[in-house]
């Protein structure tokens, strides 16, 4: 532990100051220690970058490079479903060496902000390339993110920048069928009178069967319940399922105990989160007294979420406009109860589905759609929007998107 502390730059600086402490000449001591630490750290940086073929040396007599002579370009390659590689290329078309160049990104998205591409020395007519891998979360699929790449010189002064957008492809829509059943007959650790109803003093097993109705494997599916009201204790409230193949049913259960003096049974919230699948997050608030429906088809498929201006032109990622129009469609409209939109956690739009049908089971109609369109008055900076679609049995799916107003 002591050796680790000595390697910390703040600790090392403090020790050096204390060793050379002089009340009569403290300013000189601080300056000398600071210069020594700076020199040592710079040597570490130069040695570390040299291992990657980057020359971080400095000739203090050379003039600073001109941004006009530095030609910068970039690209992004998809390595896998959740991994991108961002590439930069820079060429020196001037007549003098550029030194200690570094390219950094600026973005409203933290994942893309302050990425570093150290270039170092760049001689005339020389081209250097650098790459950084970026892990992309499922929520960003289909998003267009504003991006700025900035070139800094050896004094960390900005000498040039380019602005662009990075567009992530959409993932295949993911949705599920869920059967749920109340068990109080001793199975799965339950205790009760076996009538299939939640009652005071019983230990209830909430069994479920879930089927992936999409056309690709869902790698991880987290399902959990939590009590929002009532007198009960959740004994088994979180289930992680892996590798859900299409059309294959998975079975599991939750377990919770109602307290003996429960006068009001209360409410339980269930949430389903398909990690890195691009699926909407799903939630349901269940009144424990309610009878559970036998079959539910979850997550009506939200498609074609688009931004456009008042003239109908598509807008992606960022805008200077104060007002945009957000539109989208939901497939399988017969199971949709309503749809609503939040902007920075404030509800701005609501639409009820007047054509919903009861008793629909596995009928998946990808041709009929439930459409919506709303005007959004954008706030300056980041606008986080959530589109919620609520099904017949109270399950709500949420799809997130962003828009930057500069």
Image (cartoon, rainbow, N blue to C red):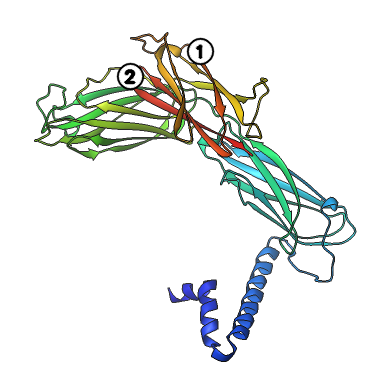
Circle 2 packing at 10 Å, graded few (<14), some (14-19), many (20+), is some
In the figure, 374 relative to 124: above or below?
above
Measuring 57% from the left and 29% from the top, which residue is drawn there? 170
**At numbered mark 2, what does the secondary structure look like: helix, strand or loop?**
loop
Which quarter of the figure is the N terminus placed in? bottom left
Residue 201 drawn at (x, y percent): 10, 33
Going by the image, does 300 lie left or right of 117? left
Residue 354 drawn at (x, y percent): 42, 9
Measuring 30% from the left and 32% from the top, which residue is drawn there? 269
**At numbered mark 1, what does the secondary structure look like: helix, strand or loop?**
strand
Q: Are marks 2 and 1 in contact (CB under 8 Å)?
A: no
In the figure, 29 relative to 299: above or below?
below
Which quarter of the figure is the C terminus placed in? top right
Residue 294 drawn at (x, y percent): 28, 17
* Number of the label disc, if any, that sits on residue 369: 1
- Which picture quadrant has residue 123? bottom right
Which of the two residues, 93 or 157, is positioned nearer the viewer here? 157
Give the residue at mark 2: 393
């Amino acid at each position: 532990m002591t050796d680790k502390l000595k390697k910390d730059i703040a600790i090392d600086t403090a020790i050096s100051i204390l060793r050379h402490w002089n009340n009569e000449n403290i300013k000189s001591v601080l300056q000398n220690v600071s210069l020594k630490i700076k020199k040592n750290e710079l040597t570490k940086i130069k040695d570390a970058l040299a291992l990657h073929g980057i020359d971080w040396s400095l000739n203090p007599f050379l003039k600073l490079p001109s941004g006009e002579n530095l030609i910068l370009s970039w690209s992004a390659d998809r390595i896998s479903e959740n991994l991108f590689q961002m590439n930069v290329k820079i060429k020196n078309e001037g007549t003098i060496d550029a030194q200690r160049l570094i390219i950094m990104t600026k973005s409203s998205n933290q994942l893309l902000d302050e990425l570093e591409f150290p270039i170092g020395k760049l001689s005339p007519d020389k081209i250097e390339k650098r790459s950084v891998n970026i892990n992309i979360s499922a929520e960003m699929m289909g998003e267009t993110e504003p991006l700025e790449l900035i070139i800094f010189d050896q004094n960390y002064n900005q000498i040039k920048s380019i602005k662009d957008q990075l567009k992530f492809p959409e993932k295949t829509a993911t949705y599920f069928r869920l059967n749920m059943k109340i068990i109080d007959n001793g199975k799965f650790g339950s205790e009760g009178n076996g009538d299939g109803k939640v009652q005071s003093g019983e230990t209830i097993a909430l069994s479920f069967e879930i089927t992936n109705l999409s056309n690709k494997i869902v790698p991880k599916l987290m399902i959990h319940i939590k009590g929002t009201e009532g007198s009960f204790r959740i004994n088994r409230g979180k289930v992680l399922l892996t590798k859900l193949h299409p059309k294959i049913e998975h079975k599991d259960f939750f377990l919770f105990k109602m307290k003996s003096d429960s006068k009001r049974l209360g409410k339980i919230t269930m949430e389903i989160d398909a990690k890195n699948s691009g699926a909407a997050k799903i939630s349901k608030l269940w009144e424990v007294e309610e009878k559970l429906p036998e079959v539910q088809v979850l997550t009506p498929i939200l498609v074609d979420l688009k931004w456009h201006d008042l003239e109908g032109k598509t807008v992606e990622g960022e805008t200077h406009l104060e007002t945009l129009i957000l539109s989208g469609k939901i497939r399988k409209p017969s199971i949709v109860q309503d749809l609503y939109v939040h902007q920075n956690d404030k509800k701005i739009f609501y639409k009820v589905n007047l054509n919903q049908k009861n008793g629909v089971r596995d009928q998946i109609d990808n041709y009929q759609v439930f459409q919506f369109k709303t005007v959004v008055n954008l706030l300056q900076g980041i606008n986080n929007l959530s589109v919620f679609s609520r099904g017949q049995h109270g399950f709500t799916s949420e799809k997130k998107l962003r828009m930057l107003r500069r």
